[in-house]
Amino acid sequence: MKKLNNSNFEMLKELFKEIHFEQEVSSLESREELFDCWKEIIGEKISKLSKMKEITADDVLIIACADSFVANELYFVKDKILPLIREKSEKLGIKIKDVKFDYKTWEEK
């Protein structure tokens, strides 16, 4: 069996010191906090048929919808929903440029 070289562990130790894990955790927590606000933003009835799914790299919030009817109805009130989402997201340090409604990504709980 080959003996491990301790110098490799020292280099890894130095690399881990340079990585800022706290930022990743706080951004995930902020995202989850925003996602938890969906019921407050949209109301109880619609929140059972839709949920915040993800934020893309180009700052678009994807809302998963139970079916195309829900996605279409939300699209019609997008101009009212987007400012409410932005208000919540800005307080959490998350930038949202746009919102898209997608019924294809819906998953039952």
Image: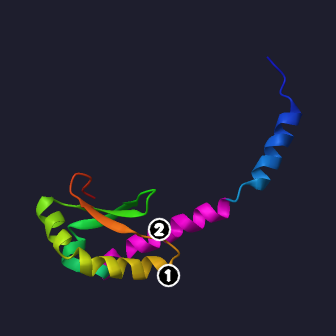
Which residue is located at x 19 percent, y 71 percent? 74
Query: Residue 89, relative to residue 105: is it above or below?
Result: below
Residue 107 is situated, as x and y percent measured from the top left of the image, at 26, 54
The quarter of the picture where the C terminus appears is: bottom left
| Marks 2 and 1 close (CB-CB < 8 Å) | no
Q: Within 10 angstroms of label 1, few (less than 14), some, or many (20 or more) residues?
A: few
Look at the numbered disc 1 and give the secondary structure of its residue: helix
Residue 4 is situated, as x and y percent measured from the top left of the image, at 83, 27
Residue 16 is situated, as x and y percent measured from the top left of the image, at 76, 50
The magenta stretch spans which residues? 21-40
Residue 108 is situated, as x and y percent measured from the top left of the image, at 24, 56
Identify which amino acid the numbered label 1 is placed on. Answer: Lys
The residue labelled by disc 2 is: 31
Camera-nearest residue between 43 and 89 = 89
Give the farthest residue toward the right: 7
Camera-nearest residue between 76 and 70 = 76
Judge depth for marks 2 and 1 and give the one in front: 1
Q: Where residue 91 is drawn, which disc sits there?
A: 1
Q: In which quarter of the image is residue 96?
A: bottom left
